[in-house]
Amino acid sequence: MRIHSLTTRFLLTLLLSTALPFLAFGWYARAEMEERLEQQVVQVFLPQLAQQAADEIKAQLERIEQAVGMLRNALMKVLREGGDSLDVALEVDLTRNFDPDLVLLADGAGRVVGQRLHPRLDRETPASREQLLPQDVADKPWFEALNRGRVAGAWWGKRHLSEFLHRTPNKESYDPEDYSFALAFSVPTRTTQRGVVFALFSWIEVQQVLDQTAQFLRQDAGFASAEVFLCNAQGHYLAHTERANYVRGRLPLELAVQLPIGGDPVEHPYRTAAGEDRRAGFASVDKPPFEWWIGVHARDDELLRTSRDLSNVLLFVTAITAVILVVWSMVASRAILRPVRRLAVATESIARGDLSTRVPARGRHELADLGRAFNRMAGDLDSRTEQLRQAERQAAWAEMARQVAHEIKNPLTPMRMSAQLLARAKREGDPREPELTERLIRTVLEQTDAMARIASDFRHFAGPPARTLEVLDADDILTDAQRHFAGMAEIGNARVEFAPGAAGAQVRVDREELRRVLLNLLHNAIEACRAGDGPRDRVTMVRVTSAPTDAAVVYRVEDDGPGVSGEVQPKLFDPYFTTKSSGTGLGLAICRRILEAHGGHIALETSGPGRTVFRFELPRV
Ligand code: ADP
C-alpha cells in the first residue's frame, strides 16, 4: 500500500512539476500561435493581397495612360508641324501589351481624321466594322468634354460595351473581352480648336490582374475557394474571376462593406447565404477619377488551415511528449520501487521467522547496496539465531536433567528410610516388623506412583506423543478419568465426585491427553487440600463437572483446599513453576498446551480458602 502510494506520489509530483506545466505551455503556445497566424493571414495577408492587386491595376491604368500619351504626342507633332502623315503617326509603337483595340483621332470639329484598329479584332468582318466606325464624334461626351476644355487632362470612360465594336451590344455578356474602357486626350491643333485622340482598351487588361491574383491564391497559397473582384464605391461589380458576376450587378449584402474612399485596406469576415464562413480583404485602386476597390475572399477553413494544421501538430507533439514523460516516469518509478518492494516483502518474511530470505542485489547503484546490506543483515541474524537456539537447547537440556535428578531424589528418600527402619527391626527382632513391612510396601507403592508421574510429565513436556483425535461424548472424558483415578493410591481419604452434565454434546479429542488433563487437575486439587493447614486426616472434597454451552463444553474441577495465593496466580501455567517440594511445575503447563492444541483453553476461575475452581473448555463438534 505504501509502495503504491509512493508510486502515485512520484507520478503526481512528476505530473505537477513537469507534464502539467509543459502541457499548459503547449496549450498557451498553441492558442497564441493560432491567434497570431490568424491575424497574419486574415488581417494582414488578405488585405495586402487585395492591395497588391489594386496597385497592379493602378499601374496598368498608368501604363495605359502613358501609352495613349505617347500616341497623343506623336499626333500632336503631325497636327502642329505637318511632318509625317497621320497614318504613320498612328502606327507609333505602343508598348506591345497596351495596344488599344481602337484609336480614333478627331479634329477640332469632331470629324474623324484618323483611325487604327487592332488586327486581332475579328468579331465583325472588316467591311461591316468599317460601317460601325463613326465619321463624326462631335456629339460624343468625351469629345465635348475635351474639345470644350471641360476636362483638363485625360478623359476616362468606364467599363462598357462599345458601340464602335459591336453592332448589337450583348448587355448580358459574361466575356470580359466584350467590354471596353476608354481613354481620351485633347490634342492641340494649329487652330484654336482642340482635336481629341480616343483609345478603346479591352477590359481583359483589368481582368488579367484579377485572374493572376486568383491564380496565385488558388495554386500557390492553396486557397482553392479564393475569388477576386473589382467593384466601385457604390458596390457594383466591375469585374470578377467568376465570370457569372459580370451580369450580377451589385455585391451580395453580406459582402457589402462601407468602403472609405482612398482609405486603408479593410478586412471583413462574413457568412454567405449558403452558410459558408468566408473572409474578404478590400483595397482601393488609388487612381482618380476611378473609385474602384479590389476585393479578395476565400473560405475561412482554407485560410486558417495552415494555422490549424500547425497548432494541431503542436498539440500532438505536446501530448506525445507528455505521454512519453508519464510513461517514462512510470517505468522509472517501477524500476526504483521494485527493489524497495522486494525489500519490504523480504523484511516481512524475516519478521515471520524465515531467516533464509535474501533479495537480489546486482549492480552498483544505491538500491543494490541497500539490498546487499539487507542480505548481510539477514545472514548475520540467521547465524546468530542458530547460535542462540543451540545455546538455549543446551541450557534447556541441562535444566531438564537437573529437574529430573531433583524430582527422582524426592520419592527415593521415604522409600530408603522405610527400608532402613524395616531392616533395623528385623535385625533387632522388633515386634513392629509386620507393621513396618506394611508401611514399606505402602511407601514404595506411593513413591513409585509419584515417580511414574514425574517420568510421564517430563516425557510429555519434552515432546507430546502423536495425537489421535476421535469424536467422543463430552461426558466420556469424565467417566474415563473416573475409571483410571479409582485405582490410584493418591486418593487417600479424598472424596472425589464426578457429575457429568453435558449429555449429547460431543468433542473431538485425544482420549489419552484429555485424561492426563483431568488427572493433573485432580492430583493438584487433592495435593492442595493435603498441604492446607487443616488436620491431615481431613476429608478432602473434590468435584468434577461438565456442562454444555452453544459452542463448547465447559469442565470444572473444584476443591475445598486453601486456594491459590495472589502472587502465585499469574505464574500458575508457567513451566517449572511449583510451590511443592516434590512438584515438577509441569502439570498445568502441560494442561494448557494440550487444551490449546485442541482449540480450547484453561483458566483458574475462582480461588479462595475453601473453594478453588479450575475451568477448561473444549469446542463442540
Ligand atoms: P506441580 O503440581 O508439579 O507443582 P503444577 O503446574 O501442576 O505443578 O502446579 C503448579 C502450582 O500451582 C502448584 O505448585 C500449586 O502451588 C498450584 N496449584 C495447582 N493447583 C492448585 C489447587 N487446586 N489449589 C491450590 N494451588 C494449586
Image (tube, rainbow, N blue to C red):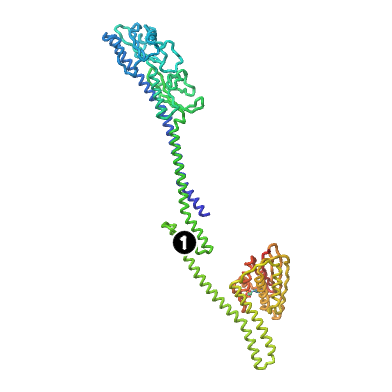
Residue 550, above or below 95: below
Decide if residue 456 is on the left or right side of residue 53. right
Residue 484 figure quarter: bottom right
Decide if residue 336 is on the left or right side of residue 452. left
Between 142 and 127, the one lying in front of the other is 127
Task: Find the residue positioned furthest to the bottom.
Answer: 428
Q: Residues within 10 Å of mark 1 (few under 14, many from 20)?
A: some
Between 495 and 152, the one lying in front of the other is 495
Residue 297 figure quarter: top left
Secondary structure of residue under mark 1: helix
Residue 592, above or below 343: below
Taking the image in four quarters, ligand 1 sits in the one at: bottom right
User: Is the CB of mark 1 within 8 Å of ligand 1?
Assistant: no
Q: Where residue 420 sits: x, y (%)? A: 63, 88
Task: Tell me the kind of residue under disc 1.
Answer: Phe
- The residue carrying mark 1 is 374
The residue at 44%/35% (across/down) is 309
Q: Where residue 394 sits: x, y (%)? A: 52, 74
Residue 324, above or below 232: below
Residue 214 figure quarter: top left
Q: Where residue 141 sits: x, y (%)? A: 39, 10
Between 280 and 376, the one lying in front of the other is 376
The residue at 67%/93% (across/down) is 429
Quarter holding the C terminus is bottom right
Decide if residue 478 is on the left or right side of residue 60. right
Q: Where residue 114 sits: x, y (%)? A: 33, 9
The total number of labels drawn is 1
